């Protein structure tokens, strides 16, 4: 299996290759790609990274897949973690580099005008790579700590403080619910994998987060019972 191929004078891989290499369900990889393409934010940029294609399955049926350039691959693969995933990431990076070298060698500029255009395109590619690196780089240790602390404070506040009955009785459940919703919202396996570009969005998410109505009612009932009990005791 060739990890990277040439298509339209560009080094690309496919969603099928990506799913197979990282042992993911192909339908799940497609779902992530299409969620990015269909999102209102940066949708035009994402469309430049992915192109719809097709392949024939073992039964000869036509099935959907996506071609993706290096930028598209980076966006999808950045969330894959583990030693095996890291090994495949390095193989893909090498494959992209080799294919891009082949493409460059086959498009040597022959005139001064072509040389100027070629150099400008090289500079543009470097700037794009730097921009992509900034966008996909995970949050710093300080930012991870800030998210952790703000998340804890938010949940404690929602529960009514550390001395509340709700904190004692269902604190673990509410903390679990908060971090689960955080990870699902930003599509990351753990909050420490959050792209640095999304840090401000994460802080806003924490500030605005509230548990479900059902959970808020449970918190309110537990804390009300505590106040009633303390009132009776004080009498």
Image: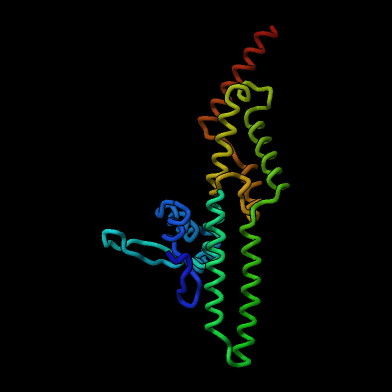
Q: Judge by depth and name the residue closer to the eye, 54 or 82.
A: 82
Residue beneath the point at 66% across and 31% down: 156
The residue at the far left in this view is 59
Kindly indicate the quadrant of the structure image that contains residue 171. Answer: top right
Task: Residue 168: give x, y in percent of width and height.
Answer: 62, 22
Q: Nearer the viewer, residue 107 or 220?
A: 107
Residue shown at the point (54%, 68%) measured from the top left: 96
The quadrant of the rendering that contains the C terminus is top right
Residue in the foreground of this view, choosing between 79 and 203: 79
Q: Quadrant of the N terminus?
A: bottom left
Residue 2 vertical placement versus 116 (above, below): above
Horizontal side, residue 154 vs residue 104: left or right = right
- Can you say whether 111 is above or below 232 in the image? below
In the picture, measured across the screen, residue 62 lies left or right of residue 66, that is left
Residue shown at 63%/25% (left/top)? 167
Residue 123 percent location from the top left of the image:
65, 76
Foreground pick, 77 / 216: 77
Looking at the picture, the colour scheme in use is rainbow
Q: Residue 2: x percent and y percent?
A: 45, 66
Number of dots carrying numbers: 0
Residue at the far right in the pictured view: 142
Report the side of 30 relative to 147 (left or right): left
**Residue 212 location, x and y as percent?**
52, 34
Left or right: where 50 falls relative to 147 = left
Q: Residue at 68% across / 25% down in the picture?
A: 162
Residue 202 sits above or below residue 178 on the image? below
Examine the rendered structure and indicate whether residue 79 appears above or below residue 10: above
Residue 42 figure quarter: bottom right
Q: Residue furthest top?
A: 235
């Amino acid at each position: 299996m060739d990890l990277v191929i040439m298509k339209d004078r560009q080094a690309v891989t496919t969603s099928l290759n990506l799913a197979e290499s990282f042992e993911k369900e192909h339908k799940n990889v497609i779902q992530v790609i299409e969620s990015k393409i269909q999102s209102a934010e940066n949708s035009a940029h994402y469309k430049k990274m992915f192109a719809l294609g097709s392949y024939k399955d073992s039964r000869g049926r036509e099935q959907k897949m996506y071609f993706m350039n290096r930028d598209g691959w980076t966006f999808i693969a950045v969330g894959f973690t583990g030693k095996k995933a890291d090994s495949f990431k390095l193989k893909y990076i090498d494959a992209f580099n080799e294919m891009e070298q082949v493409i460059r060698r086959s498009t040597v500029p022959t005139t001064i005008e072509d040389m100027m255009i070629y150099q400008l395109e090289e500079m543009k590619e470097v700037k794009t790579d730097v921009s992509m690196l900034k966008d996909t780089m995970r949050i710093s240790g300080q930012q991870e700590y800030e998210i952790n602390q703000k998340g804890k404070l938010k949940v404690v506040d929602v529960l009514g403080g550390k001395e509340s009955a709700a904190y004692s009785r269902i604190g673990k459940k509410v903390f679990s619910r908060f971090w689960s919703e955080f990870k699902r919202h930003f599509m990351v396996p753990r909050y420490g994998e959050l792209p640095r570009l999304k840090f401000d969005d994460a802080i806003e998410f924490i500030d605005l987060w509230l548990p479900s109505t059902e959970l808020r009612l449970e918190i309110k009932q537990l804390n009300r019972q505590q106040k009633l009990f303390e009132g009776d005791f004080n009498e």
